[in-house]
Amino acid sequence: MPLITAPAVDPPDPGGTPVPLPEVGLAVASYTDPSGTVWPLMNEAAGWFTLADGVSGLGAAPYTLTTDAHPRGGARLRYAQPQPRAIVWPLYVYGEDHVEFVGRWRALATAFTRTLREGPGWLEIARPDGTRRRIAVHYQEGFEGRGSKGSGIVSDSAVITLWCQDPYWIDPVEVSVHRETGALVDFLVPYPSVSSSQVLGATTLRNPGDVVVWPKWTVTGPASLITFTHNGTGESFSLNPAATGHGNLLAGERVTIATDPPAVRYQDGGNWTAGLNWPGAVLWGLSPGDNPVTFQLDGSGPGSAVDLAFSPRYETA
């Protein structure tokens, strides 16, 4: 069965020379606002740069621990809940004159605060070896300036706090996996034989990250019943296209199953969530490392395929 991974692409140049960051080491940072504009954070030629000594919040995610007291002393861990993280990022902004400084200050302030109205921006850390990790951020506070005598004329510094609802960093390059039916055989050539109508079967999916990921699945017909099982946990879910009123998934038709948040959409945008085998359906995720799974497509034929994509998630930048 073929395995197709994401094609190699050249990442955008974040600009600047790698500098040592606390909890990270040598890296270059950039910020992408909700409009898609990339703001280099370590290129002095832009008119601002990062005060690396004040950066914090790039290490492991914070957790709240739920424990039960142990009769013989101490406690036992019942559950660890990851919490939103806060990243502190000091910026020094300057200009050749007051007008240039104010223009840069206002533009940066807008780039960060618009995350409160238009959705998150992305803080990205790029390593000298070309690897990158990013995290979704919302502006919280800090773009007020020092407020001291002489500041705010041709230069000032802002100590920005960025709030991250998901505390984990992700790889901006998705992992993609493709599985499809093998070649079907003629019943009489070269001798009587039967091709199974249940294809794809058992396989292994690898999550290279530190924490569970929640993939998005795309199934291409034909298929009359779709069942995905995680053999390690026993969790599974099935999608019956007929239960949506559509009938079997025909050749070339596609349905996408998102696992976080749960959503099932036909190719025209129609909601097929009712086609899942509730209440027993568990839209499972992929744990770090190897995951033994089984893909089963009843009523399959030429062109039947399963594609999944996910971004690996990491504890640190």
Image: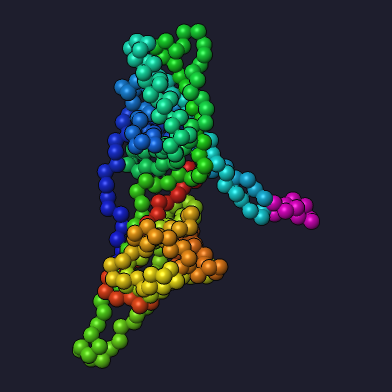
At horizontal 40% and vertical 54% (from top left) the residue drawn is 310
Query: In which quarter of the view is residue 85 placed?
Result: top right
In this view, 70 is above or below 140: below
At horizontal 52% and vertical 27% (from top left) the residue drawn is 141
Tell whether 38 sits left or right of 121.
Answer: left
Q: What percent of the width, then of the height, locates residue 242?
A: 41, 73
Q: Quadrant of the C terminus?
A: top left
At horizontal 27% and vertical 47% (from top left) the residue drawn is 9
In this view, 260 is above or below 183: above
Q: Quadrant of the N terminus?
A: bottom left
Report the magenta residues as a range: 67-76
In this view, 296 is above or below 19: below
Q: What percent of the width, then of the height, locates residue 264?
A: 43, 61
Residue 245 is inside the magenta segment = no
Q: What percent of the width, then of the height, locates residue 253?
A: 31, 66
- Whether residue 232 appears in this view of the structure is no
At horizontal 67% and vertical 53% (from top left) the residue drawn is 77
Tell whether 71 sits left or right of 1.
Answer: right
- Whether residue 111 appears in this view of the structure is yes
* Callout count: 0
Query: In which quarter of the view is residue 104 placed?
Result: top left
